[in-house]
Amino acid sequence: MTDATTDQRTFGEDFLWGSATAAYQIEGAAAEGGRGPSIWDTFSHTPGRTSNGDTGDVAVDHYHRWREDVALMKDLGLDAYRFSISWSRVQPGGTGEFNAEGIGFYSDLVDGLVAAGIKPVVTLYHWDLPAELEARGGWTNRETAVAFGEYARRMAVELGDRITVWTTLNEPWCSAYLGYASGVHAPGRTEPLAALQAVHHLNLAHGLAARAIREVLGDEAQLSVTLNLHVTRPDDPDSESDRDAVRQIDAVGNRAFLGPLLEGAYPVDLLQDTAAITDWSFVEDGDLETIAQRLDVLGVNYYSTGRVRRHDGTGERAQADGHGDSGATPWVGADDVEFLPQPGPHTAMGWNIDPAGLTELLLGLRDSYPDIPLMITENGAAFEDVVDADGRVHDAERVSYLHDHIDAVGQAIDAGADVRGYFVWSLLDNFEWAHGYERRFGIIRVDYGTQERLWKDSARWYQRLVAASVLPEVTQV
């Protein structure tokens, strides 16, 4: 429980404070150390796919500067660091030979974190599928899930019990729907059937990976998956049609993953909503049992909320709610749902700021899955940061955002949600996917020309929070 009886909210001693990154967004060294190309290399090098043609070739050069970055984490006082492994760096083709130099990079990073007193929380897949696997169908191909299980097994052997939490997938909703339905993320396909195949094969990949890790490390291995669960509200709460639109979005956006992962079944209404696209015959006997592996913690990523109504033929149809991207609709099976503009304030991504939505989400998970601990594995905001004449970034909007959302987590804990930690997104400014380098989420600023790291006020504020596990006022920087 938190203690909010004073002016400042206090979190428990065991509450885990961390920050998060993703390999393609920060590492750079795209063609170094035996790394093979991923779908994001291909996508970002395709003209018109990213803002200004930006790529992750250099990113923020974490591959060469990881020791400096770990020192920053130590100075921040972080309890834990959530990072992802580039599959194509450790196994360039996604199958076949593993790359000792790539494995060595991550092993050294983990050792550096442990030596600094920082718990390593690893994500095995954060959207950067080896390009060779995509050439063979990517996540539409069942064999990709099988390959992922073997990759996970090898990482368990190599990194062993030095890892505090093993997270299999980050936001499979984005991988499946933004990558294969709307096409605004790699690999850039717009095929509804492919998106649903990807949903299932990502779920299957999670199950195979979880099973493999436990076979290597035993039941003491802490396993997780991270989902970007959608908080969606009806435009008119009294409208049955609008409430049903919410149900559709919940089915394709949330329960398509929660159902098989935690309940061992796909929702019946999801199967009905998508019957015109597929009969789901790609789900084979035994798959659901494989997927429903025991989770030790459920990762929750949260940024904004959505508001929907039944499409009346006059407005735009559903768009890529949750990551601010436009394109073909990712909402397979919900094509007649319309997302409506949300009132402000908004971040630089155009996402509405709604801390109450995070409390609502956590309490909903408490009610549906009371036995599964939760972890906020991503939460943060992009704003138009400016380096002032004094050489500092006074990002008051970000400090306010973090304060209010962490307070929302505390409110959920007070109401009975079992939330074990919070990871701010992100440690560093970085390559923000299709938005390139135009959006800055970091609490530490990166000058992309010099790679100089500069603490923003939000980093100093977060340092105070982590040191005392007491929520500082927004003016305490």
Image (cartoon, helix red, strand yellow):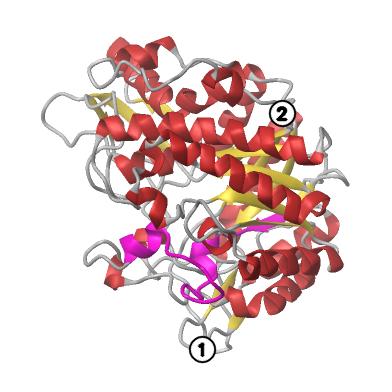
Q: Residue visible at 47% across and 67% down?
A: 440
Is residue 326 among the parts visible in the rendering?
yes
Decide: is 91 above or below 356: below
Indicate the quadrant containing the N terminus: top left, top right, bottom left or bottom right.
top right
Residue labelled with disc 1: 450
Residue labelled with disc 2: 417
- The answer for how far apart the CA atoms under marks 1 and 2 are is 43 Å
Rendering coords of residue 165 (x, y %):
74, 45
Residue 278: image tag: none
Question: 346 left or right of 310?
Answer: right
Identity of the residue furthest to the left in this view: 314
Q: Earlier in the sequence, mark 1 or mark 2?
A: 2
Residue stretch rendered in magenta on the structure: 18-44
Q: Secondary structure at mark 2?
A: loop
Rendering coords of residue 288 (x, y %):
54, 19
Residue type (three-letter) at the residue carrying disc 2: Ala
Rendering coords of residue 31 (x, y %):
46, 75
Indicate the quadrant containing the C terminus: top left, top right, bottom left or bottom right.
bottom right
Q: Residues within 10 Å of mark 2 (few under 14, many from 20)?
A: many
Rendering coords of residue 166 (x, y %):
70, 45
Q: Residues within 10 Å of mark 1 (few under 14, many from 20)?
A: few
Q: Residue visible at 58% across and 69% down?
A: 428
